[in-house]
């Protein structure tokens, strides 16, 4: 009986691994139709009795401004071009900070945030974190860095019901994402830690200071030259059909 149960669980695990790997591979090329976070926010609004309209429009990589790409990297994951999905030094630093008590500090990379927003649910548990590690590994294995950032910018939450750079640009500044200025891009990046409480269009003094710091970090990263590293970050062992 126990042996049969183990075999069934192993089969389920293998099916899950195969199905999720195929799904991640398909999203290597196909626009993601939405995220589980969007579904979660919609259900929350129904429960609260204040239904929201979800705003999201896909923008391809070439249509997204370099300033926004750099601002998000500067704000959220400055080692994005170098790591394989996990910033070990940042994780160790966050663990030391959290063990000391006080506010909880995270250390999620952009790859981890894509995995969480696209496929998982909110909250903290070892189960969710374990599945996040699996999806992050798949994303880093099967997607180039440019694709990871492209999906992130089209999926990130930037307000109540506002998802993706295009919806965020129109909601906060009344322009399309390609027309964001450097300052506007830095303000959008500045509110990412708390997008439903902080406003890019009506920034508090804290958000304004954070945006100024982000602009300085963008310059220190090397500007648009940093983005060229994302192309070079593709694994050399990838087959040609994955390099396309």
Image: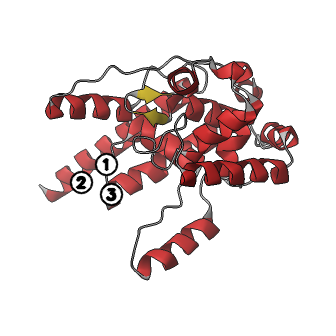
Image quadrant occupied by the N terminus: bottom left
Q: How crowded is mark 2: few (under 14 residues within 10 Å), some or many (20 or more)?
A: few
Q: Residues within 10 Å of mark 3 (few under 14, many from 20)?
A: few
- Residue 24 lies, with reference to residue 213, above or below; the image says above
Residue under the image location 52 percent in, 48 percent down: 204
Q: Marks 3 and 1: which is nearer the front? A: 3
User: Could you say whether the residue bearing mark 3 is in a helix, strand or loop?
Assistant: loop
Tell me the colour scheme of the image.
secondary structure
Q: Which of marks 3 and 1 is nearer the N terminus?
A: 1
Residue under the image location 70 percent in, 37 percent down: 183
Q: Residues within 10 Å of mark 1 (few under 14, many from 20)?
A: few
Q: Is residue 107 left or right of residue 240?
A: left
Which residue is the site of mark 2?
6
- Residue 143 position in % (x across, y down): 64, 35
Q: Distance between the residues labelled 3 and 1?
A: 25 Å
- Residue 95 position in % (x across, y down): 49, 74
Which residue is the site of mark 3?
124
Q: Earlier in the sequence, mark 3 or mark 2?
A: 2
Q: Nearer the viewer, residue 200 or 33?
A: 200
Q: Is residue 132 left or right of residue 84?
A: left
- Residue 72 lies, with reference to residue 172, above or below; the image says below
Q: Which quadrant of the structure image shows residue 161?
A: top left
Which residue is the site of mark 1?
10
Residue under the image location 63 percent in, 30 percent down: 150
Q: Nearer the viewer, residue 35 or 102?
A: 102
Q: Would residue 80 be visible to someone looking at this image?
A: no
Q: Do the residues labelled 1 and 2 touch (CB within 8 Å)?
A: yes
Q: Do the residues labelled 3 and 2 touch (CB within 8 Å)?
A: no
- Residue 187 position in % (x across, y down): 61, 40
Q: Nearer the viewer, residue 79 or 10?
A: 79
């Amino acid at each position: 009986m126990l042996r049969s149960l183990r075999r069934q669980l192993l089969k389920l695990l293998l099916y899950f691994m195969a199905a999720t790997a195929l799904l991640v591979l398909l999203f290597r090329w196909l626009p993601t139709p939405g995220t589980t976070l969007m579904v979660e926010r919609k259900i929350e609004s129904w429960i609260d009795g204040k239904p929201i309209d979800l705003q999201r429009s896909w923008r391809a990589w070439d249509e997204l401004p370099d300033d926004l790409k750099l601002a998000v990297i500067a704000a959220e994951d400055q080692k994005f071009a170098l790591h394989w999905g996990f910033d070990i030094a940042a994780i160790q630093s966050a663990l030391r900070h959290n063990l000391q008590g006080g506010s909880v500090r995270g250390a999620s990379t952009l790859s981890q945030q894509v995995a969480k927003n696209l496929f998982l649910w909110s909250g903290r548990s070892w189960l969710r974190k374990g599945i996040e590690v699996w999806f992050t590994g798949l994303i880093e294995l099967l997607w180039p860095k440019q694709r990871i950032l492209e999906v992130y910018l089209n999926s990130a939450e930037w307000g109540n019901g506002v998802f993706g750079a295009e919806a965020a640009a129109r909601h906060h500044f009344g322009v399309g994402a390609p027309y964001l200025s450097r300052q506007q891009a830095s303000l959008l990046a500045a509110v990412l830690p708390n997008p439903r409480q902080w406003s890019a269009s009506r920034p508090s003094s804290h958000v304004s200071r954070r945006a100024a710091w982000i602009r300085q970090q963008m310059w220190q990263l090397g500007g648009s030259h940093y983005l060229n590293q994302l192309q070079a970050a593709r694994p050399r062992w990838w087959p040609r059909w994955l390099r396309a």
